[in-house]
Amino acid sequence: METEAAKLIGAGLAAIGVTGAGIGVGNVWASYYNAIARNPSAKNDIGANIWIGFAVTEAIALYALIVALIVLFAF
Amino acid sequence: MAEQTSTNGGDGGGGFGLHPMEQFELSPIVPIQIGDLNLSFTNSSLWMVIAVAIISALMMLPTRGRALIPGRAQAAAEMLYEVVANMLRDSAGKEGRQYFPFVFCLFSFLLIGNLQGLIPGSFTFTSHIVVTFALAAVVFLGTTAIGFARHGIGFLKFFAPEGAPSWSLPLLVLIELISYLSRPVSLALRLFANMLVGHALLKTLAGFVFVLGIAGVIPLAGLVAITALEVLIAILQAYVFAILSCIYLNDALHMH
């Protein structure tokens, strides 16, 4: 039973890593709107690149979730 | 039953004995065993064949007439072509053109694979790291080979940034080397993690809908919203995988 409890606590701790990705994704979109507000004509140039930035940052959150899932289900 | 599953956190909250990871299980359809090698035709292989069939049907059937004014299906096929062509032209330039067939295959295979995984009861082959890592390894080995074929031994200069003071070179080369070698890992892990976590999340939320009874309307609304997000993620991750491959190709062709 103690290992079960330790597993749940560990998975919860692993999920804290999502915080960093939350800040990162917020930063990505904040910079996007900042850039567009300063220079509206740059909107098309930024275009798809913002999605790459978003996806790369968001993936970090998923790494944390993977660790949590491994702790929960793989042991 | 409801009390049992809702208090059992280690089970992942899946109602009616459904485990959120059960959907990723491989099951052989045609068992083939050669010596110690298991070459069974599994449900993963089946959905890969279906994906290839869908792409082939989409690209070949509507474009057979080659109408000057495209119909709906031909317009869709042309749009898919243009997306990949633009992506390759923008990030790898004119020399990248000759690698278009590979990038197009990669993008369409992953796109259809991710999207068909959202059909209930289907199997997402991109949620297995074997599949994504094999594709990422092909991209990594291919671009490295192209780099050496084009620049010869001079491709090693790629790891030493220009204009850096010479005393910092050993450290910089080490950092560049590590970041270069981690490319296939991050490429594979990103797609794999997105698909795995997305589908596990959907299954867990679906478990809440059963467990909560009439109040299950609330997680059901969340489930609909997250399914919409998953469609976006499925397209986006295929796009990101393809465009990062193009960027790596550009590095090999032009060295920065």
Image (cartoon, coloured by chain):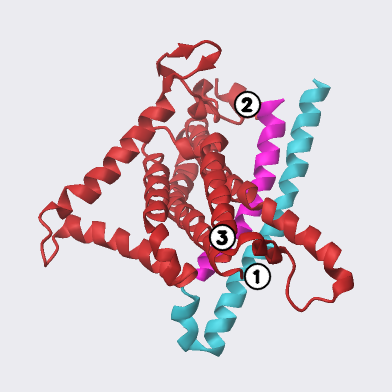
Q: Position of residue A21 (x, y in %)?
A: 67, 58
Q: Position of residue B196 (x, y in %)?
A: 55, 39
Q: Which residue is mark 1?
A: A27
Q: Residue at the location (49% across, 61% down)?
A: B246
Q: Which mark is residue B248?
A: 3
| Mark 2 burial class by Cα count in 10 Å: few <14, some 14-19, many 20+ | some
As helix, strand or loop, the secondary structure at mark 1 comes to helix
Left or right for A6, reference A48: right
Q: Is residue B170 magenta?
A: no
Residue range of the region highlighted in magenta in the rendering: A48-75
Q: Position of residue A17 (x, y in %)?
A: 73, 51
Q: Position of residue B179 (x, y in %)?
A: 71, 57
Using the numbered discs, state the Cα–Cα distance from disc 1 to disc 2 in whole angstroms. Answer: 35 Å
Q: Nearer the viewer, residue B2 or B81?
A: B81
User: Residue flagged by tag 2: what amino acid is it?
Assistant: Asp
Q: Which chain is red?
A: B
As helix, strand or loop, the secondary structure at mark 3 comes to helix
Q: Residue at the location (55% across, 78% down)?
A: A33
Using the numbered discs, state the Cα–Cα distance from disc 1 to disc 3 in whole angstroms. Answer: 25 Å
Q: Residue at the location (42% across, 49% down)?
A: B106
| Residue B194 seen | no
1 or 3: mark nearer the eye: 3
Q: Please report, as a chain letter, where disc 3 is located.
A: B
A9 above or below B92?
Answer: above
Q: Which residue is mark 2?
A: B11
Left or right for B67, reference B86: left
As helix, strand or loop, the secondary structure at mark 2 comes to helix
Quadrant containing the C terminus of chain B in the rendered view: bottom right
Q: Which chain is cyan?
A: A
Using the numbered discs, state the Cα–Cα distance from disc 2 to disc 3 in whole angstroms. Answer: 41 Å
B22 above or below A34?
Answer: above
